[in-house]
Image: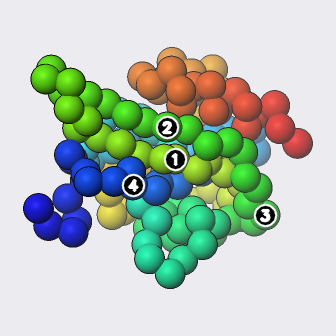
């Protein structure tokens, strides 16, 4: 197993996600890599060795959407654990989610994102497949 392997990990992987807001809309990216390829999701990804979770959150939004962020606040922590048909853990992420306002709305997909787009809260609720992401979006939109 390589150090970069994410499926069937020997330990949980720390990831970050960010609910990015701008003028009443939220940013979603369409995932280009597993897990959940092709689904709309929060921008985010794996924390790198030597960076704080907030630094990871800011870097991931910059890499996936080209957006700088204003203040970034911790929102919640979520466990993503998916098992294969044999019951083995295929994916295990500890996801640390933030909420932040974008400094502008010129999102451009890059890195792990096939697309990046702004959604109204109602549109985002319909576009996102994972119930946990919908819950996080609702938390972030209620936070202020």
Q: Categorize mark 4 by other alpha carbons within 10 Å: few (<14), some (14-19), many (20+).
A: some
If you read the primary sequence from the N terminus, does the residue marked by circle 3 or circle 2 appear first? 3
From the image, tell me which residue sits under label 2. 79
Q: Indicate the colouring scheme.
A: rainbow
The quadrant of the image that shows the N terminus is bottom left
> As drawn, which residue projects farthest toward the bottom?
50
Question: Few, some or many C-alpha atoms within 10 Å of disc 1 (few <14, some 14-19, many ≥20)?
Answer: many
Q: Is residue 21 visible?
A: no
- Indicate left or right for 98 with 43 as reference: right
Secondary-structure class at tag 4: strand
Q: Is residue 142 left or right of residue 69?
A: right
- Mark 2: few/some/many CA within 10 Å (<14, 14-19, 20+): some
Is 119 placed above or below 107 here?
above
Where residue 68 appears, as percent x and y from the top left, is 63, 69
Q: Are marks 4 and 3 in contact (CB under 8 Å)?
A: no
Q: Residue at x 22, y 65 (%)?
A: 4
**Disc number at residue 71?**
3
For marks 4 and 3, give the one nearer the viewer: 4
Task: Give residue 40's quadrant in the image.
Answer: top left
Q: In this orientation, which residue lies closer to the viewer: 61 or 80?
A: 80
**Residue 128 to residue 51: above or below:** above
Badges 1 and 2: C-beta atoms under 8 Å apart?
Answer: yes
Check disc 1 and report the residue beneath it. Answer: 95
């Amino acid at each position: 197993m390589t150090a970069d392997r994410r499926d069937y990990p020997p330990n949980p992987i720390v990831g970050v996600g960010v609910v990015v807001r701008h003028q009443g809309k939220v940013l979603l990216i369409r995932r280009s890599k597993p897990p959940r390829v092709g689904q709309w999701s929060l921008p985010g990804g794996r924390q790198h060795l030597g960076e704080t979770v907030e630094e990871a959150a800011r870097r991931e939004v910059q890499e996936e959407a080209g957006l700088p962020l204003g203040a970034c606040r911790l929102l919640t922590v979520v466990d993503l654990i998916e098992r294969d048909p044999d019951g083995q853990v295929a994916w295990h992420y500890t996801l640390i989610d933030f909420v932040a306002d974008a400094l502008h709305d010129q999102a451009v997909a890059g890195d792990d994102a096939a697309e990046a787009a702004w959604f109204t809260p109602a549109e985002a609720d319909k576009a996102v497949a994972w119930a946990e992401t919908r819950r996080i979006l609702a938390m972030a939109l209620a936070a202020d």
